[in-house]
Image: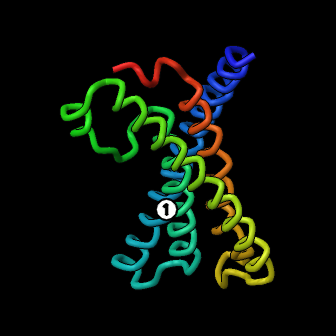
Amino acid sequence: MLTSLSAGLQTVSRYLYTVLELLAKLIFVIMVVSVSIAVVGRFVFSKSPSWTEEVGILSLVWLCFLTAAMGIRDGSHMRMTIIEYIFSPKVCNVMHRIAYVVLLVLYMLFIKIGLDAILMMSKSILPSTKLPLSVMYGSVFVSGILGLVMALAKLFDKESFKL
């Protein structure tokens, strides 16, 4: 049963990672285009569209939160590798597992806080794009769900803890 759960989590995390990678590229392009329009508008035409700043900020926030969840799966999140030189592989494996449990708790908090922020900000509107402010805080909620899945997949993956 645990093996099939682990295999399922690995499949889901692989699929999510691929989708997130494409989405992150798209959001990055949107951010670059938005900021470029703002810069060209400001320095060439002395006026830039008001929506460019909001779209740039929204893109940056979403990109940061989505790629944070991606970093869990590929192991590129910040960690201290010095422990691998100090402690035995058994102790390191335990410490790595504890780190993923801490990430699980953190991403559960992201889900709770993100949902609270979405509900609280749903009536507020961004002035230029007329989007609800909850769109920005939705990134915390979505990142919480994605990070939770990625951390669970890492925690149940036996290959993740071999040194």
Residue 27 or residue 138, whichever sits in front: 138
**Horizontally, is 153 left or right of 1 in the view?**
left
**Horizontally, is 65 left or right of 10 in the view?**
left
Secondary structure beneath disc 1?
helix
**Horizontally, is 32 left or right of 11 in the view?**
left
Q: Quick check: 1 above or below 46?
A: above
Mark 1 neighbour class, 10 Å CA radius: few under 14, some 14 to 19, many 20 or more: some
**Horizontally, is 24 left or right of 36 in the view?**
right
Where is residue 16 drawn, in percent x and y? 64, 34
Q: Quick check: 75 above or below 54?
A: above
The residue carrying mark 1 is 60
Number of residue marks: 1
Q: Quick check: 3 above or below 87?
A: above
Say which residue appears at 59% left-offset and 47% top-offset. Answer: 104
Where is residue 161 drawn, in percent x and y? 43, 24
Where is residue 120 drawn, in percent x and y? 76, 79
Say which residue appears at 74% left-offset and 66% top-offset. Answer: 115
Where is residue 151 drawn, in percent x and y? 57, 39
Q: Quick check: 42 above or below 90?
A: below
Q: Quadrant of residue 76?
A: top left
Q: Quadrant of residue 119?
A: bottom right
Of the residues shown, which amino acid type is indicated by label 1? Leu
Say which residue appears at 46% left-offset and 24% top-offset. Answer: 160
